[in-house]
Amino acid sequence: MSAETSWHAFYQSDLQSLYALVALPAAFLVIALARPVRSADPQARFVFLWSIAFALETILDPIATGPLSRALAGGAKTAVMLGFVLLGDWRVWLLVFALCYRPERRARAFAHSAALTCVVPIFAYLTDLRLRTVWPELPGQVLWLVYEASFFALALTLRGPLLRRLASAARDAERELARSLLGFAACYYALWACADLLILAGIDAGWALRIVPNQLYYALTVPFVYLRAFGWRRAGSLGRAY
């Protein structure tokens, strides 16, 4: 491919980085609000409200970090981008802890998920800093590669026996939804890491691969949780449980 038709150029375009990312969440939001989940169970209500809140956040993210951020200075642009990265991670940890804990421990779920959200960025930053003391010329993509690999490892660790202990008071449907979300998040982070390895190797197709986890992260995470929990006809795992 020429520079004008490279995967990198397409990846940077508004078609990929904006419109393709907001179309499905916007459609999901309209459908979900048109037929809200009405349940006496606080866990089911929380999952529904989580879906609405983070569908809105998913739509706002590529707008704020794309067209709106172009008018910002470097430091402000980085702050906006980092803020949405943390929000995207927090939505996973928040729902996992909310499903694992009983509703009366909701405040603890918010606190624990917020604390866990800080683990990966701090570890990635310190690791990247350490690597640069040995190899100062490392490309900036290395920081994201460490971040992606760290989140992948943490999600898989939490998805194993640790989740069973954490969710000892949870019902089977809640535990399985938490496991499904952790597996889904681990999948898009693994794909991002593979794509960045290709990019670091100078392979333009790495940008094409990166489009796949972008869709999983932005367009499909919230609909996946909703369908897994309720189904369009309330036949999902939480729909059956409640």
Image: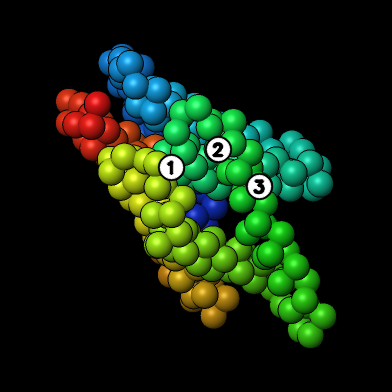
User: Looking at numbered disc 1 in the image, what kind of residue is underneath it?
Assistant: Cys
| Of the pair 80 and 74, the residue shown nearer to us | 80
Decide: is 227 above or below 1. Answer: above
Q: Of the residues under marks 3 and 1, which one precedes in the sequence?
A: 1
Q: Of the residues under marks 3 and 2, which one precedes in the sequence?
A: 2
Q: Of the residues under marks 1 and 2, which one precedes in the sequence?
A: 1
Identify the secondary structure beneath mark 1. Answer: helix
In the shown orientation, is residue 209 left or right of residue 177?
right
In the shown orientation, is residue 55 left or right of residue 137?
left
User: Which residue corresponds to mark 2?
Assistant: 109
Viewport quadrant of the C terminus: top left
Residue at figure coordinates x 53%, y 30% from the top left: 106
Whether residue 140 is visible here, answered yes or no, is yes
Q: Position of residue 96 (x, y in %)?
A: 45, 44
Packing grade of label 1 (10 A; few <14, some 14-19, many >=20) is many
Identify the mark at residue 115; answer none if there is no mark: 3
Q: Position of residue 141 (x, y in %)?
A: 63, 68
Packing grade of label 3 (10 A; few <14, some 14-19, many >=20) is few
Whether residue 192 is visible here, answered yes or no, is no
In the shown orientation, is residue 56 left or right of residue 45?
right
Identify the mark at residue 100; answer none if there is no mark: 1
Decide: is 150 above or below 12. Answer: below
Residue at figure coordinates x 41%, y 58% from the top left: 159
Q: Determine the CA span between mark 3 and mark 2.
A: 10 Å
Colour treatment of the image: rainbow
Q: Position of residue 150 (x, y in %)?
A: 57, 66
User: Looking at numbered disc 3 in the image, what kind of residue is underneath it?
Assistant: Ala
Identify the secondary structure beneath mark 2. Answer: helix
Residue at figure coordinates x 34%, y 46% from the top left: 175
Decide: is 154 above or below 18. Answer: below
